[in-house]
Amino acid sequence: MAEILDGKAVSQHFKDQIKAEVEAMIALGKRAPHLVAILVGNDGGSQTYVAAKEKACHEVGFTGTVLRYPDTISQEELLKKVHEINEDSEIDGLIVQLPLPKHIDENAVTQAIKPEKDVDGFHDINMGKLAKGDTTGYTSATPLGITMLLKYYGIKTSGKHAVVIGRSNIVGRPMSILLSDSSETGNCTVTLCHSRTSNLKELCLQADIVVAAIGRPGFVKGDMIKPGAVVIDVGTTRLDNASKKAGWRLAGDVDFASASENASMITPVPGGVGPMTITGLMFNTLKSRKLR
């Protein structure tokens, strides 16, 4: 059976480090980092994610502010609030929780956030810096959190073949760049796969590291995993589960039971990549504060 990569424990390890830095900052009379999250509407998943981010802010000593708006807010009103926060020198990071209502252009909103406060790493300038290997920008929180997980467990990536399943700008593309970059958790030969990849199983069976971020529950089966491979499951699909009080459960992109038979290490869902994403966000916010 595969070793479990415990995102909760690793997240706590890095949050403790961040908290110590914030305490030292405050002891010198400096302001604590301030992260603002904008939540539009009443999407259950979005509310859960924002609440977890707010909780993490308090845990590490940040000021965490959540601005909640009805799903009837206009794009103009939302952009006005983004611009206000951009100009507020007391705020270090701004995230707008996605998805947004259909009448709002998500790209227009994410690009309106100042790159210096874009701690989600979605702005074109930060994406461009990532592609160039420029570490002065902000890396998308989920890929950043995954690299922190790999580093913590001492997983060797240099010279390995990594297969990333999914080409989103939030996870798949930046993850492929980080794994191929010249860094401690890079130097992989990377194959970026997606829904149109015709020989996906064949490619996965060649992979030393598999990152599944395709958004299809249980898509990656055990017979797609090479014995000894490291499996990182980014999936977080909500499925109905009447037996639970919440009425839903989180499902990953990997069939955990069968994949665990072949993998040497694997992340669970929940408790794997999810906590590391929030830690990546905290890391970026601290970085922004230190640059001011």
Image: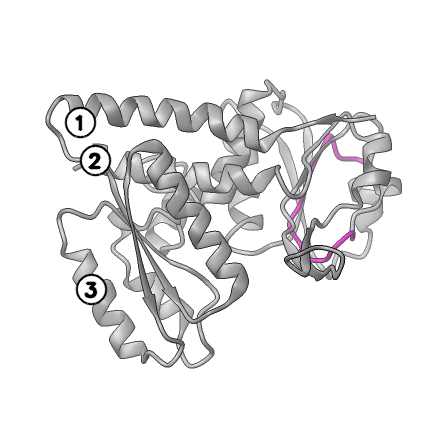
Which numbered dot is residue 32?
2
Tell me the kind of residue under disc 1: Ile
Q: Main secondary structure of the magenta part?
A: loop
Q: Quadrant of the C terminus?
A: top left
Mark 2 and mark 1 residues within 8 Å of each other at the beta carbon = yes
Q: Is residue 13 magenta?
A: no
Number of the label disc, if any, that sits on residue 26 = 1
Left or right: 268, with 184 as reference point:
right
Q: Which residue lies at the image location 50% right of the left edge and 36% below the top edge?
A: 145
Q: Amino acid at mark 2?
A: Ala
**Quadrant that contains the N terminus:** top right
In the rendered image, residue 139, in percent from the top left (x then y), is placed at 41, 42
Q: Position of residue 178 (x, y in %)?
A: 51, 37
In the drawing, what numbered circle is on residue 172? Answer: none
Label 2 – label 3 distance at C-alpha: 22 Å
* Residue 204, percent from left and from top: 78, 41
Residue at mark 3: 83
Q: Up-down: is 207 above or below 219?
A: above
Disc 2 + disc 3, Cβ < 8 Å = no
Q: Quadrant of residue 164?
A: top right
Between disc 2 and disc 1, whose residue precedes? 1
